[in-house]
Amino acid sequence: MYKLILTLILFISASLKAQESPVSIFNNTVSASTEEISLFNSVRSVNTVQMTDMNLNDYKSKAQNGLDFMSPGSSVLNLRCERLTGLSEETAEALISYLRDLRKDDPDLLNNGSIESDVADLRNRDCRAGIMTWQIANNFNTKHVSSVVFFDAEWNVIFDTELVKMVTGVRPLENQHTEFEEDTNPNSTATIVNQRSGTMTFSYVVEGTFSDVTHYNRVRATAIVPPYITAATNDAFFNSNTTEITSERRNAGTFSPPTEPCLYFGTGGEIGNSYNGATPFSSRVYLSNTNDHFNDGTYQVSGSNGHSWSFSFDFSVSAGPVGIGITPQQNDPEFTLSPSGFSEVKVKNYVYYYLLGNTYRALFYDGGALRLNNFNILTGDASGEVGSVTVKYPMQVAYWSYLILYPYSFTGVTLTLSNVQYLRGDHLPQPTYRLTSANYNIPVGQVDTIEAKVTNNSSQVKMEGGSVSIDVSSLNGHLTLLSPATVSLGTINSSSSKTYKFIVRGASDGVVTPQVNISSAGWTWPVPPDVVVNDIFSIDTNIVVGSVGINQTSTGIPVEYSLSQNYPNPFNPVTNINFSIPKSGFVKITVYNMLGKEVHSLVKEELSAGNYKVDFNAASYPSGIYFYRIEANDFVEIRKMNLIK
């Protein structure tokens, strides 16, 4: 009741002032511009001309067309021209000033001289200026309107300070466009994406009483979820926001409507002229992985219109013995959850216009933003590594000019930001290691190679940084390290391996168990830098250094050279080989694979005459046929052996 009384007071006050300043149904709480008042005064100051045979049908038709679009159900009443004058030089100058103020957001139009040219054309056509008064009536009240009008010789309305503010229709243009961009983090893979941004361009024509103007809206929205979720908490926060709302007017003419477009997000609602008359619009935020859900928590929706106001409201989601519920933290917002559980939230967004206080909620001007904050995600226990969030922004359009909210909207396009993905740390496979030697029997003085193989078992992220070091103390002085003890890990791609080599030389007889350290190797983005790998691993089979593996079996002097068949044969993985030499000399026994490639050196040293046995440990070799060959002075012989694992 208070609002109704206040409204009536304002209406009566506006009517009493009708003869002193311009009055509009849409401008009850806003003063007319200085330029508009000067235009009124210039028309009042010029001598009147005769109104013989004046025809106001064109004016009434154009006024009614605007009302039919902007205020359906309203009618034009008591239309009359209070004063009619010629278009004097003073009035023409005042009209130019008024139009330049009206077109201040169209610099191209201001700079090309169109306004001055169009006003000069009105004078050349002997157009007349007048002051119009009329009323707008509907089922609720009647309001008084006054304006400056310009007629041609046939009483067609060329321009009117009130009718120019009216819109008679809106139509979309073809080729509406939506595109997406993925996170461009240089360390990311095609699988893990923690950010999705989309651009929505929507174009439409606002049809005015005298001419039209084309609007181009461009909205960029971004959805972000921290890409790595720790095993300890298994949760993350999802946020999305429109990082850019831009609007541009094109094809504006001197007499185009001075509309400023507004945007709002969501679908299904209606704009109201008061808070209670509005129907909420809703946008969706949901998890595409059904094993995950939004956790208990308080979430926030906030926005700003790019000018002077903003809004913010919170709501909480909770689970109890009777099911899932949403609780607003204040009285006005409304939210719903999907029936199946936490996996979807519909954010309802009121859009309303409160005339008396000029208050607007959830409308977004050029430069505005909408944010959804702190949606807490609790991941499930599925075996997969990746979860994802989807957010949908349906965009609607409203029109705003001189504090007029045109009650017209249509569905544009929906900006869907999908596959905002995250990696669950508790499902990150750890690396595996293997340390091997080229030979497991290394004579004193012989150079050999020890290889450390590191395998990255994650199919999602790389290993990077840190070092691989051989523990020199584990060589026990039996092997001498010839290469650096520490090498850089570098980068190991997902589902890949990398081998690191250490060069050693036999130093003294003994058995050796080398060890290698992986120190502070980290995972690449999106895993946080404090998640590192530190491990120690040993060789798969001990290394025998020196003559420990060669034994002289008797002190007698053999009559001839010989190479016995290995025993056992087949073998796994160790076999014995006996040989005899009748005189001292250099002896070499070498093992070859089926391709004739040397794979192992058993003996490579000076031996005195006698009978000997040497062990061959094939733990590091695959099953198959192998050959061993003896060279002693002029004696050469080859035999075959079979390794079966």
Image (cartoon, rainbow, N blue to C red):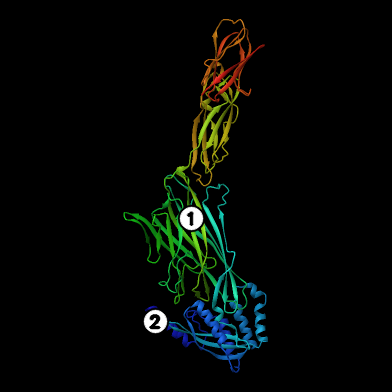
Q: Secondary structure at mark 2?
A: helix
Q: Nearer the viewer, residue 410 or 225?
A: 410
The residue under label 2 is which amino acid type? Ile
Q: Residue at x 45, y 46 (%)?
A: 230
Q: Looking at the rendering, which quadrant does residue 622 occupy?
A: top right
Q: Earlier in the sequence, mark 2 or mark 1?
A: 2
Question: Furthest residue to the left?
Answer: 321
The residue under label 1 is which amino acid type? Thr
Q: Is residue 104 visible?
A: no
**Residue occupied by mark 1:** 390
Q: Position of residue 444 (x, y in %)?
A: 58, 19
Q: Secondary structure at mark 1?
A: strand
Q: Residue at x 37, y 66 (%)?
A: 331
Q: Which mark is residue 563?
A: none
Q: Residue at x 42, y 81 (%)?
A: 7
Q: State which quarter of the image contains the N terminus.
A: bottom left
Q: Looking at the rendering, which quadrant does residue 354 occupy?
A: bottom left
Disc number lying in front (2 or 1): 1
Q: Nearer the viewer, residue 185 or 280?
A: 280
Q: Position of residue 380 (x, y in %)?
A: 42, 47
Instruction: Using residue 178 as the reference point, say whether residue 272 is left or right of it.
Output: left
Q: Circle 1: is it few (<14), some (14-19), or many (20+) Cα within 10 Å?
A: some
Up/down of 358 relative to 126, above or below: above
Up/down of 84 relative to 307, above or below: below
Q: Position of residue 308 (x, y in %)?
A: 50, 69
**Residue occupied by mark 2:** 5
Q: Position of residue 568 (x, y in %)?
A: 52, 16
